[in-house]
Image (spheres, helix red, strand yellow):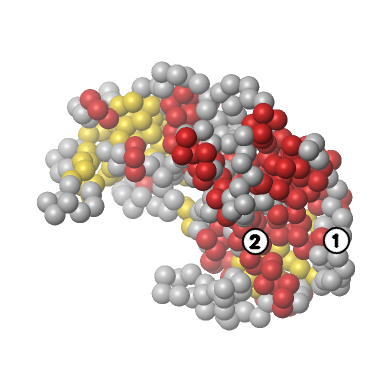
Amino acid sequence: MAESCSNRSDVVVSPSPEGKDLGRGQRRDPLDNAGEAQRCLLCKKPKCALQGCPVHTPVPECMLLYRQGRLEEAGRLLFRNNPLSAVTSLVCDWKQFCYGHCVLNVKQNPVRWYEIEQEISGAYLSTHRLERQSLEFTGDRIAIVGAGPAGIAAAVWLYEAGAEVVIYDSNPRMGGVLRYGIPAFRLDKKYCDAYEAMLADAGVEFHGGVHLGKDITLEELSASYDAVLLAAGAEKPATLRIPGEERAVQALPFLKEPSAFKLGKKVIVIGGGNVAMDACRTAVRQGAETWVYYRKTFENMPANPIEVEEAKADGVRFKVFQAPVEVKEGGVVFRDCENVVPEDGGRVVTRIIDGTDHFVECDTLLTAISEKPDFKLFGDAPVVLNEWGWPVLSEGQKVEGLKNVWVAGDFCLGPKTVVEAVGSARTAIDDMMKSL
Ligand SMILES: Cc1cc2nc3c(=O)[nH]c(=O)nc-3n(C[C@H](O)[C@H](O)[C@H](O)COP(=O)(O)OP(=O)(O)OC[C@H]3O[C@@H](n4cnc5c(N)ncnc54)[C@H](O)[C@@H]3O)c2cc1C
């Protein structure tokens, strides 16, 4: 059956005319980092760090060390503050964070700190060996569930503080979304390998392929360890709640092992977030004609605009103002949408237009709507839940109702970012350490 497109000519976007990769952490022109570092004003109250960065990266201090050629010291400072610095400098949405808060932004020429950070941290990570920085928590045994960014950062800090750390993960290897979600064309898996090797070298035990809630219970962990950190991410996919949805493929399992899926010639991805962008860019690399269908417009897309540009440059095509209403054999029924401005000038709302159903053929439908944490892994533990079914937490992210369990990363924040997962791990670990 032929594809029946909407007759709205404004909704189809062809590949970006520039066709250039604007990848985060990659430059349009070869830039001299040394020259770039000289442009930094070394602000006394750096907005890039204090307001722009969830982990308050000490930008001016590191910039000064970098200018003085003291790269090892700069690397140590960055690693101590954020062990995932080599990764966040590549995958952060820097326009939202450091770069977007640089005071030179007023002149529209902010300092590309993230590129300097990547140079420093990448080199530091490749040679760094973990060492005990204190013996304060010697003898304390801590279990971490989840070896994503939050779990890795927590393991590093706890190990350095003298604790005995054991990590459990349902996946066979460390990295969480960094290994099993973000595609290799955006993030080289060598970073996950480096963290895995570093922690193994330090003697941190890793039990891959162990699923909390099936292979072990929280009660068992809580009884066997002095403290438990749950950093199990947000992997439970939200559903479209439309007939025929079972025919669709979820984006996360697809991204975990793209080669396990036979996509066919034409793929439609539903969603407008970063997961949708990674899914469409992966599908297009498998040779499929790939479309992203989104119910609102480009300005409403939660995806980083750079990722949308990158997807266009890859040849992904977009169709906005399209709401799926039914998944059928061989395609999807969509209904047109439009933005309506209320008469009182209030917030624009997106409305589905009745009578505009049209069938669009595709071989595979990938859905990337949203994800949430799976609180089933608490099992029968007496967790206090709030009215939305989320665990009630103390300020330091200790779980109410449980004696020695803390949470971190997407598991308590919902789907966020790598740097925010690291920041939340710091909050949990600081609180946990006070109680040990
Ligand atoms: C496709 C995709 C692309 C993204 N792109 C970016 C980006 O470009 N930049 C950015 O900053 N952020 C990005 N994010 C978000 C970012 O990756 C997450 O915010 C971050 O990984 C959260 O870290 P975490 O450690 O909390 O969880 P995760 O990375 O999800 O790790 C959780 C770990 O817990 C394990 N686990 C789960 N349940 C169990 C269980 N029951 N028993 C044992 N182990 C379990 C999982 O196997 C996993 O290894 C992206 C997310 C996705 C899905």
Report whether 214 appears left or right of 141.
left
Label 1, secondary structure: give it: loop
Using the rendered image of the protein, determine whether residue 142 is visible from the camera's viewpoint: yes
Question: How far apart in space, not on screen, are marks 1 and 2 (Cα)?
Answer: 18 Å
**What is the count of numbered marks?**
2
Query: On the rendered image, what quadrant is the N terminus found in?
Result: top left
Please report the residue visible at 80 percent of the width from the left and 36 percent of the height from the top.
69
Residue that badge 2 annotates? 425
* Residue 46 locus on image (x, y percent): 59, 50
Eye-nearest disc, 1 or 2:
1
Please report the residue visible at 61 percent of the width from the left and 47 percent of the height from the top.
43
In the rendered structure, which disc, 1 or 2, sits on the residue that comes first in sequence? 1
Looking at the image, residue 170 lies above or below residue 138: above
Report whether 60 appears left or right of 300.
right
Amino acid type indicated by mark 1: Gln
Residue that badge 1 annotates? 133
Looking at the image, residue 337 lies above or below residue 315: below
Q: Nearer the viewer, residue 305 or 218?
A: 305
Please report the residue visible at 42 percent of the width from the left and 70 percent of the height from the top.
388
* Residue 188 locus on image (x, y percent): 67, 34
Query: On the rendered image, what quadrant is the C terminus found in?
Result: bottom right
Looking at the image, residue 59 lies above or below residue 204: above
Q: Nearer the viewer, residue 189 or 377?
A: 189
Mark 2 residue's CB less than 8 Å from ligand 1: yes
Please report the residue visible at 52 percent of the width from the left and 28 percent of the height from the top.
22
* Residue 249 locus on image (x, y percent): 46, 42
Amino acid type indicated by mark 2: Ala
